[in-house]
């Protein structure tokens, strides 16, 4: 399964990434991690199950590219944008790329 995690440097994203990369149940998952500064996750550069992408959720092209091979999109970003560009871009990219599963949370502790 191909999982794309958007805003991959957040607290919730780190928890999800850790579990996906260490628990045997998830051994067949390929991760695409999109964040504005991928060097923040440089420790994952040599992991064969991880692809790091530089991207911004307010840029539709970045979101489309990050989700093009995804079976599931995971986003843990608080959408403070007045026009909800990140959320709209995620939904549009999912539709365009035929991704039927999107998991969205915005606050740690939910």
Image (spheres, rainbow, N blue to C red):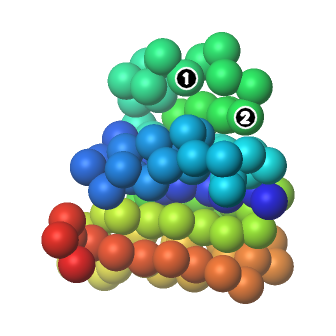
Find numbered disc 1 in the image and state the secondary structure of the residue it sits on. helix
Could you say where residue 102 lies in the image, as x and y percent from the top left?
A: 58, 78
Image height check: is 51 above or below 88? Answer: above
The residue that label 2 is drawn on is 49
Rounded to the nearest angstrom, the CA distance separating label 1 from label 2 is 9 Å
Q: Residue furthest front?
A: 24
The N terminus: image quadrant: bottom right
- Give neighbour class at mark 1: few <14, some 14-19, many 20+ (Cα, 10 Å): some
Tell me: 107 left or right of 41.
Answer: left
Q: Residue at x 66, y 81 (%)?
A: 101
| Quadrant of the snapshot with the C terminus | bottom left
Q: Residue at x 54, y 72 (%)?
A: 90
Q: Is residue 30 above or below residue 46?
A: below
Q: Is residue 26 above or below residue 60?
A: above
Left or right, 28 with respect to 7, comes to right
In the drawing, does residue 42 fall left or right of residue 23?
left
Q: Is residue 27 left or right of residue 69?
A: left
The image quarter containing residue 82 is bottom left
Of 84 and 13, nearer the camera is 13
Label 2 sits on a secondary structure element that is loop
* Residue 61 in view of the camera: no
Q: Position of residue 9 (x, y in %)?
A: 35, 41
* Residue topped by disc 1: 44
Q: Residues within 10 Å of mark 2 (few under 14, many from 20)?
A: some
1 or 2: tag closer to the N-terminus: 1
């Amino acid at each position: 399964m191909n999982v794309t995690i958007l805003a991959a440097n957040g607290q919730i994203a780190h928890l999800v990434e850790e579990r996906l990369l260490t628990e045997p149940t998830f051994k067949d998952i390929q991760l695409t991690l999109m964040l504005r500064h991928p060097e923040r996750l440089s420790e994952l550069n040599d992991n064969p199950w991880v692809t790091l992408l530089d991207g911004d959720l307010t840029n539709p092209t970045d979101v489309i590219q990050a989700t093009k091979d995804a079976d599931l999109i995971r986003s843990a970003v608080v959408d403070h944008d007045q026009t909800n560009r990140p959320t709209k871009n995620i939904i549009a990219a999912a539709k365009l790329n035929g991704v039927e599963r999107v998991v969205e949370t915005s606050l740690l502790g939910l």
